Structure formats: structure tokens, C-alpha cells
Amino acid sequence: MSDEDLEFPRDPASMADDVEVEAESDAPAPAELDPETRARRDAALRLVRKFGDPVLRAKALPVERFDSDLAEEAESMGRLMHDALGVGLAATQLGILHRMLVYQAYVDDPLTVLVNPEIEWRSDEKEPGEEGCLSLPGVHVEVERHAAVRVRARDVTGAEIEIDAEGLEARVIQHEIDHLDGILILDRIGRDARKEAMRAMREAQRAPSAA
């Protein structure tokens, strides 16, 4: 299957400007961004598929070819994530059905790329935490996640890697793997919270991009 076969066409309804991101913990509010940073952020967000795009409900396919194209794809995803002021991004959020994600949970950490990630172990302990999503503008909801996980994956060269993560890193990994399985944070909350989240998203989409 070619790379072209792995890319979903963009849904025109998903191209609306948005005003919220899954932000870095110390990222300034949108209104506080300098013009250059805001322009990069807005350009990056326009490339992210939004709620309603069918690719967000698709299950990503395992990566079988580890080559320079894959490395470039991962680098591009990391750059876009940083420009969008996000902490994680799954390939499906860009319309690409590769089972690959990138994340940087903390500012001082390097960018991590996980190809074909699978969670091998989950802690019994769970903890709630607020999450946003680049694909769900305006939405911030409390989601319960496993406090720690062990993930086995490959890097862009195909080498096996294993990561033991806890806290924010564990949360980001679980969030992005959900994306690769076609699961959104809206699926992880109750009916009333989901209604409120949908209302917040509609309000965000109506707001002017300069807000």
C-alpha cells in the first residue's frame, strides 16, 4: 500500500479556524502571543484535522517501511506540534493512517517519536486530569487515565524501544494512542460533560481567529 493510500482527503467542514490547543503547560494564552508566534500557530492548526473529519475515527495501520520518508514525516510532525504549542500529535490528526505519534511532555525533554506503539502494562492506579486536544478546539475536559504505563514501540529507524512513563508523560502517550485507535477524549467522559464540551467547541469555532 502506497503512502498516498494512507492519506485521507480533508473534510472542508474541518478547516474552520480554532482558538484552542492542547497547550504546553507554560504556553502563553493566545491573546498574549507575539504576531510571529501566533501566525505559526494558526498555520499549524489549519493542518490539523478537526472534529467531524472521518479520519479521526479511523484506526491507523502499522508502519512497515522505515526509511527517510518516515523520518521526514516524524520531523514534520514534531515541528508542527511545536508551532501549534502542543505537547503531542498523532499521524491520524494530519490525515495520515500511519501508526505513529510524537510528543514532548516537558519543555526540557527531547521530542519522542513512537512508531507502532503498544501499551504493554498499565498501573492499577488511575488519576483524573484536564485534557485538551488540537482536533477539538475549545474543549478541555477531565479524563481519568492510568497513572503509569509501559509502552513498547519502534523509533524511525525501526529499532525497538521501551518507555516507562508516569504523570503527564503517561497521560500524553495514552491520549495520542487513543487517536491512533480512532478514540477521542469525548469518548472518555460522561454524557453531561460531553454535551458541555460540544457547546464549548461550537463557541470556539464561532469566535474570531484573533480572539
Image (cartoon, rainbow, N blue to C red):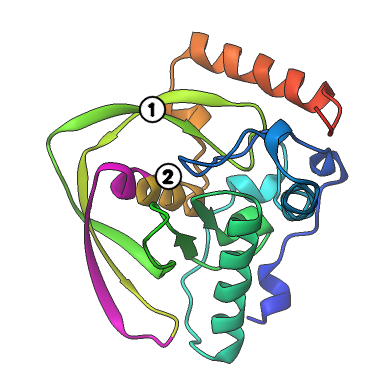
User: Horizontal and vertical percent for residue 73?
Assistant: 61, 76
Q: Residue at x 12, y 36 (%)?
A: 124
Tell me if residue 38 can be seen.
yes
Q: Is residue 138 above or below residue 40?
A: above
What segment carries the magenta color? 157-171
Residue matched to label 2: 175
The quarter in which the C terminus is drawn is top right
User: Horizontal and vertical percent for residue 50?
Assistant: 70, 41
Q: Secondary structure at mark 1?
A: strand
Tell me if residue 6 is in the magenta stretch.
Answer: no
First reached walking from the N terminus: tag 2 or tag 1: 1
Q: Residue at x 82, y 38 (%)?
A: 17
As measured in the structure, the alpha-carbon distance from the residue carrying label 2 to the one carrying label 1 is: 10 Å
Callout 1 crowding tier (Cα within 10 Å): few <14, some 14–19, many ≥20:
some
Dot 2 and dot 1 residues touching (CB under 8 Å)? yes
User: Horizontal and vertical percent for residue 9?
Assistant: 80, 58
Q: Residue at x 45, y 40 (%)?
A: 25
